[in-house]
Image: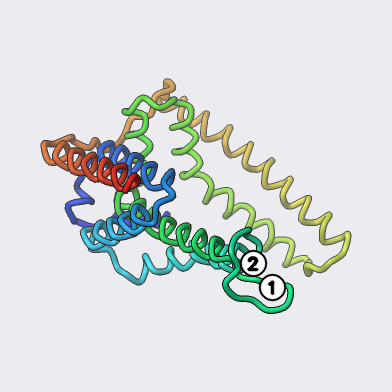
Amino acid sequence: MNERFAEGTSSLHRRDPKAKIIAATTLVTASAISNSFTVAAMTLLLGIVLFLLTGLPARLVMKRLLAVNSFTLFLWLTLPFTYDGISFTGTGPLHVSSQGVQLAALISLKTNGIVLILIALLGTSRIANIGHALEALHLPERLCFILLFSYRYVFVIHQEYQRLVRAAKMRCFVPATTIHTYRTFGYLFGMTLVKSWNRAARVHQAMVLRGFDGHLIPLSRDIYTRGDTVFLLISTALTLLLILANFV
């Protein structure tokens, strides 16, 4: 389990996860519901500033942004040609809508800004800390359990699936567009579910033997400080600024 964004000593790394969850939720919500280019540009600028404060390697963050922008690229290839509006250029049956271009640009700005904000605020905490912080914020306990256990065991399930695939290849299995291939992958998927169920039963039994009573006890506790209060006040002010900019 690689949590490279969570490794650091910046001021954002030291903030309490509860404060960062609240700040990320309010800032992202204020940006997501807005249709203003001013708000989108402010969101992107805020995301860049927060990213610089984290001191994270730019190369790693750029890889995440490239993955996200692969989806926005699809929007640029479709929206300008399919969105209704004033056509400013085109040839034959293809016309480029100015409203489509504006919408694609708006989505691109907001997407990159929101991703940078989430990386800077949530990516700088470990998933286990975020799960316990969500529980401390009184989110449904079962949802917090699902988040924590999914993060812990999705890699184990993936490793089990890879082991089954290797076993199939050692038996000379070669994927192809045939009924045999589809049936084999169906068996592999089914066996992965069966083994996951058995693994979950063993894990639950081991937890009960260690005294598990339905409550997860964190190995480390984050201490809420005065700096977290100041951080929340600043994030609240920035959220209000985004909301006010929506009416400009």
Q: How far apart are marks 1 and 2 (CA)?
A: 6 Å
Instruction: Tell me the quarter of the picture where residue 227 sits.
Output: top left
Q: Residue furthest left?
A: 226
Residue 81, numbered label: 2
Mark 1 neighbour class, 10 Å CA radius: few under 14, some 14 to 19, many 20 or more: few
Element type where label 1 sits in the image: strand
Residue drawn at the location 74% of the way across and 45% of the way down = 190
Give the mark nearest the N terminus, 1 or 2.
Answer: 2
Q: Which residue lies furthest to the right in this view?
A: 179
Residue 127, numbered label: none
| Residue wearing tag 1 | 94
Residue drawn at the location 76% of the way across and 56% of the way down = 185
Q: In this view, does 212 lie above or below 19?
A: above
User: What amino acid is at disc 1?
Assistant: Leu
Q: Closest to the observer: 14 or 217?
A: 14
User: What amino acid is at disc 2?
Assistant: Phe
Q: Do the residues labelled 1 and 2 touch (CB within 8 Å)?
A: yes
Q: Could you tell me which quadrant the N terminus lies in?
A: bottom left
Q: Closest to the observer: 188 or 115?
A: 115
Q: How many marks?
A: 2
Residue 214, percent from left and from top: 44, 22
Residue drawn at the location 84% of the way across and 54% of the way down = 183
Q: How is the image coloured?
A: rainbow
Residue drawn at the location 19% of the way across and 48% of the way down = 14
Q: Closest to the observer: 210 or 78?
A: 78
Residue 72, percent from left and from top: 52, 63
Q: Is residue 84 left or right of residue 32?
A: right
